[in-house]
């Protein structure tokens, strides 16, 4: 059974860098499971910078914007899997549903999240999941953005409940919310 770790925080809080340091402190082999589709030049540049940040260490990259549970299930040769990020995955699921003329609901989000949790529990190592904490701002003005916030919030709660460790990162400072203290070198 996997050790599930959730790293949450606001945008540009340092959560991805913290998650990477945590993953690199664990014995490999390790893989970075990226959920971000490259949709424009700015996104391509961000992806390039993330890859460069991992280049000094032994990382494999798996790109999967939609089938997160399947990707986790296929990654069993790794001891450490860093999923970055859950929030982009939610966005991708909303977009995919919209392309099909469907509405992606909180209930659908819960179903997909249970699939991911089951895949995580079957993983033979450590899974570190990065997500954005969206529930600390104002209520979004439009229905689609509120649905995104609600789906992401539901998934964050479910993953946090399943995780052994949960850390909230603020301004680059990790704050332990749940679990045992881990030392980073």
Image (cartoon, helix red, strand yellow):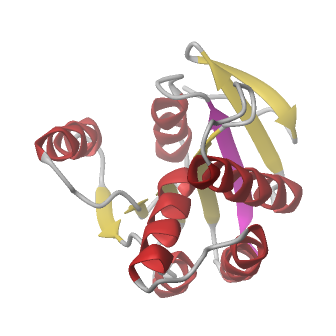
Q: Is residue 81 visible?
A: no
Q: Is residue 184 left or right of residue 41?
A: right
Residues shaded magenta: 1-9
Which residue occupies 30% across, 45% down? 57
Which residue occupies 66% across, 76% down? 116
- Say if 130 sits above or below 137 in the image: below
Looking at the rendered structure, the number of numbered marks drawn on it comes to: 0
Was residue 121 drawn as part of the magenta stretch in this picture? no
Was residue 5 drawn as part of the magenta stretch in this picture? yes
Residue found at the far front of this picture: 142
Quadrant for residue 135, please give it.
top right
Which residue occupies 54% across, 26% down? 185
Q: Is residue 58 visible?
A: yes
Q: Where the N terminus falls, by quadrant?
A: bottom right
Q: Closer to the camera, 146 or 38?
A: 146
Q: Is residue 53 left or right of residue 102?
A: left
Percent x, y for residue 143? 63, 52
Quadrant for residue 8, please give it.
top right
Q: Is residue 149 left or right of residue 88?
A: right
């Amino acid at each position: 059974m996997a050790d599930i770790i959730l790293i949450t925080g606001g945008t540009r809080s340092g959560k991805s860098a913290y998650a990477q340091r945590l993953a690199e402190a664990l014995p490999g082999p390790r893989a970075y499971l990226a959920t971000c589709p490259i949709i424009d030049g700015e996104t391509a540049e961000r992806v390039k910078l993330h890859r460069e940040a991992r280049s000094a260490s032994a990382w494999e990259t798996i790109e999967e914007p939609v089938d997160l549970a399947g990707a986790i299930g296929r990654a069993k040769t790794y001891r450490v899997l860093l999923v970055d990020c859950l929030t982009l995955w939610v966005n991708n699921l909303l977009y995919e549903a919209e392309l099909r003329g469907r509405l992606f609901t909180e209930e659908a989000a819960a179903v997909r999240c249970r699939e991911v949790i089951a895949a995580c529990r079957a993983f033979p190592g450590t899974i570190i999941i990065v997500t954005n904490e969206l529930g600390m701002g104002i209520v979004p003005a439009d229905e689609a953005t509120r649905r995104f916030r609600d789906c992401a919030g539901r998934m964050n709660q479910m993953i946090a409940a399943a995780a052994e460790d949960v850390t909230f990162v603020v301004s680059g400072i990790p704050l332990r919310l749940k679990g045992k203290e881990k030392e980073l070198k």
